[in-house]
Image (cartoon, helix red, strand yellow):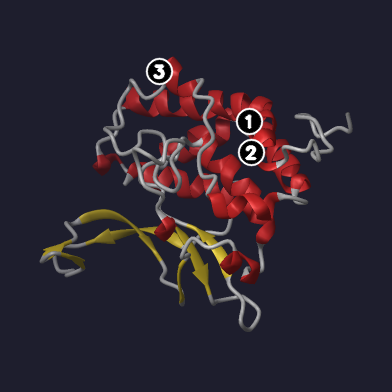
């Protein structure tokens, strides 16, 4: 839950469309069903507002109906920054693509169109493992694989190189104080230790610089193999 809370705040900072979200205080008198006969326990809970729409089915053609195609490239940059293995893993042979984590909302979209929503960040940073002080290991801070790049995205990124350039430029502006504010907003009831919070912030900040320096080189062979990317990693014409 802490990873989802932090990841969704970072997605919003990164100017990606997300569901409206908040932390809701659940009381013993509340009966919020979670499925399988379970209910939410009392305490702070991360909640999002439902929207009309449906999960993406995985086809490139369906993406032609979204009103915000300019978010596709930044979404890949974001997933790579946050090591989000639960949308499209760098190794789909070991972890299947999760199309449900790309939502097509009917709200605030043109008739017959959709708005792409970035959702579910429970597997950011740890890939579902425990969030602890070991999260900032060097193999994670320097992971050079691309996350979130669905095959259906690739064709839509051709001609949208500027979206990636702008996402890189924004990532370069990320500051530690922003990270600390987000990480420190994790409710104490979720039992994330001081050491784990410090390590998480270290991971996020180190990866911001590392990904900004390298993501264009990582994406170019996959998305622009003919050398049609017109900007270097600093956003300048080569």
* Residue at (29% x, 40% y) in the render: 188
Horizontal side of residue 182 vs 230, given as left or right: left
Q: Which mark is residue 137?
A: 3
- Marks 2 and 3 sit apart, C-alpha to C-alpha, by 27 Å
Residue extending farthest to the front is 226
Identify the image quadrant of residue 43.
Answer: bottom left
Identify the image quadrant of residue 171.
Answer: top right
* Residue at (57% x, 44% y) in the render: 76
- Name the N-terminal-most of marks 2 and 3: 3
- Marks 2 and 1 sit apart, C-alpha to C-alpha, by 8 Å
In the depicted structure, whether residue 202 falls above or below residue 74: above
Q: Which mark is residue 218?
A: 1
In the depicted structure, whether residue 120 falls above or below residue 91: below
Q: Nearer the viewer, residue 219 or 21?
A: 219
Q: Residues within 10 Å of mark 1 (few under 14, many from 20)?
A: few
Image coords of residue 20 (percent x, y): 48, 63
Q: Residues within 10 Å of mark 2 (few under 14, many from 20)?
A: some
Looking at the rendered image, the disc whose residue lies closer to the viewer, 1 or 3, is: 1
Quadrant into which the C terminus falls: top right
Residue extending farthest to the left is 37
Residue extending farthest to the bottom is 111
Horizontal side of residue 54 vs 150, given as left or right: left
Which type of secondary structure does the marked residue at label 2 adopt? helix
In the depicted structure, whether residue 70 falls above or below residue 121: below
- Marks 1 and 3 sit apart, C-alpha to C-alpha, by 21 Å
- Name the N-terminal-most of marks 1 and 3: 3
* Residue at (42% x, 68% y) in the render: 49
Tag 2 residue: 222
Horizontal side of residue 34 vs 47, given as left or right: left
């Amino acid at each position: 839950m802490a990873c989802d809370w932090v990841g969704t705040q970072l997605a919003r900072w990164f100017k990606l469309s997300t569901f409206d979200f908040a932390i809701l205080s659940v009381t013993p008198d509340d009966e919020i069903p979670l499925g399988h006969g379970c209910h939410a326990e009392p305490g702070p809970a991360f909640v999002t507002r439902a929207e009309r729409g449906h999960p993406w089915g995985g086809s490139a053609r369906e993406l032609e109906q979204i009103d915000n195609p300019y978010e596709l490239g930044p979404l890949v940059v974001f997933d790579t920054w946050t090591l989000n293995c639960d949308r499209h893993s760098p190794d789909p042979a070991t972890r299947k693509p999760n199309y449900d984590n790309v939502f097509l909302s009917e709200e605030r979209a043109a008739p017959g169109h959709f708005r792409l929503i970035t959702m579910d960040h429970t597997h950011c940073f740890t890939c579902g493992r425990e969030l602890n002080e070991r999260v900032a290991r060097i193999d994670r801070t320097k992971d050079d694989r691309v996350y979130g790049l669905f095959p259906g995205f690739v064709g839509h990124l051709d001609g949208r190189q500027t979206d990636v350039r702008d996402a890189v430029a924004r990532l370069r502006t990320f500051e530690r104080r922003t990270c600390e504010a987000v990480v420190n907003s994790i409710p104490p009831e979720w039992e994330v230790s001081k050491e784990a919070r410090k390590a998480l912030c270290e991971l996020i900040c180190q990866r911001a610089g590392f990904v900004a320096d390298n993501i264009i080189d990582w994406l170019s062979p996959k998305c622009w193999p003919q050398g049609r990317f017109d900007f270097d990693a600093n956003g300048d014409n080569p």
